[in-house]
Image (cartoon, rainbow, N blue to C red):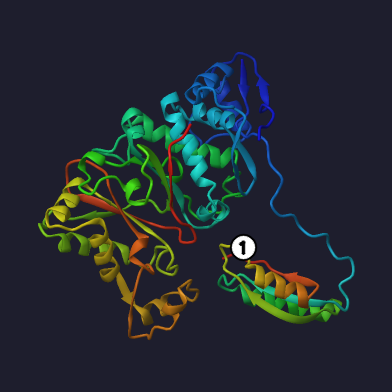
Amino acid sequence: MSLDTPQIFKIPDSSERELQDLFLEKGWGDGLPMVAPTRDRVEEMLSASKDLDPDEVIASLPPRDGIATRRIIAVNAVMAGCKPEHFPVLVSAIRALSAPEINLRGVNATTHCVAPLLIVHGKAARDGDYNSGLGAFGPGNLANATTGRAVRLILHHVAGATPGTGDASTQGSPAKYSYCVAENLDSSPWGGYARSVGINDESAVTIHCGEAPHNVHDMESSEPSAILDKVASTMTSWGQNNAPISQGEYFIALCPEHASTCSSHGWSRSDIASYLFNKATVNVGEARKAFELRAWAPWQHALEDTDTISMTEKPENIKIFVTGGAGKHSCIIPSWGMTKSVTVPILP
Amino acid sequence: MEIYAPTGNTGEPQRSLAAPIPVLNGLSLGILDNTKPNARVLLDRLAERLTERVGLTLAKAEVKNAALAAPDQVLESLSKEVQVVLTASAD
């Protein structure tokens, strides 16, 4: 399906300040200056999709039910400062965001501080110069910063996730400006994350709708269990949405050194997930006291107050990938809860 | 200079609101509680007021998850037994 060309505004040649004021006046943008989406710049962005129809519908995005065509995605990519080599990653991310299991209407509209995290995997991460090393979550890398920002601009402009009308987030989040990282495949002892979830293409992107990263600091340990006990401790704070919503996933972003310690002791991805499932637990009675509203699996409701309960209902909800550079800081990214991550191949 | 608008077109909404019912007197009322804290307090009070003022009869209450659409069986159950449903809540 194709749609008509989006609206074009003729504006007088103006100063940079006047242009930015025009964006603000129209309610466009994230508050930071943007690049003007002129025809030439949008055409250059679309050149990354070669002969594919620029007006093909990639996704319909709630709550506005805005239609994201390649051209509209390109317009927002230009405004965010993306280069054409980032465009296929962005198009694929938007495709992933429209998957039903993401529950984008809820993600955009909730009072929670959720933001979609993009994880770029494989060849596209290398070709696009995405940062998977030191400081991977930012700042300082154009690809990570602008691709993540373009997703937010699309959610704002196309999906209508505007604070106050389409986004009810109580406090918002810095992760809502830009939230994109690359997987450090060279330092991943278990191979790529995408392959572990059945995507065998050379490039892929994962969307996980979660909170901003929660740090895990461990400089001391040479055993996996000691590092992972700190990860489990970070997973069990009462304030995160996973606490009352048992279907929620966790993404565990291990730094290369923590990953290496785990791997050198023979621990696989699933070993780590199983260990965390058994260690990231809380007392059932305390959980019942903490949350009047508990979205638990039926079997969890049957547990006694004296039992323990894991922060998520199955080990498969704990997802492990490697990112970052030298040093001993990992992080966890808890979920909004009523959403599941999606990994898709990168296609233009 | 010519620039594109970044918002694009909108598609057909996946759901639309039902037309309002002009006369409520004598109809059966249902509650669809989204289980947010205090939702039921608010909905019960509204139902009580509507019963007193316009003669609705509270016939059924159902619950749904706050972040997801109501399951089909919940909607079917309500549609069979009531003509008007109250559902609204914030945190």
- Label 1: how many residues lie within 10 Å, few (<14), some (14-19) or many (20+)? few
- Number of marks in picture: 1
Q: Is residue A308 left or right of residue A93?
A: left
Q: Is residue A7 left or right of residue A150?
A: right
Query: From where the camera sits, is residue A312 visible?
Result: yes
**Residue at left offset 55%, top offset 26%:** A52
- Up-down: is A74 above or below A14? below
Q: Quadrant location of residue A81?
A: top left
**Residue at left offset 53%, top offset 28%:** A74
Image quarter in which the N terminus of chain A is found: top right
Q: x and y percent of residue A66 in the render?
A: 63, 41
Disc 1 residue type (three-letter)? Ala
Q: Residue furthest top?
A: A13
- Up-down: is A192 above or below A234? above
Q: x and y percent of residue A197 in the render?
A: 36, 51
> Disc 1 marks which residue?
B69
- Up-down: is B27 above or below A59? below
Q: x and y percent of residue A24 in the render?
A: 58, 32
Q: x and y percent of residue B30 in the render?
A: 74, 76
Query: From where the camera sits, is residue A150 visible?
Result: no
SS for dot 1? loop
Residue nearer the viewer, A326 or A199 = A199
- Chain at tag 1: B
**Residue at left offset 56%, top offset 62%:** B67
Q: Is residue A322 left or right of residue A198?
A: left
Residue nearer the viewer, B54 or A106 = A106
Q: Quadrant location of residue A236?
A: bottom left
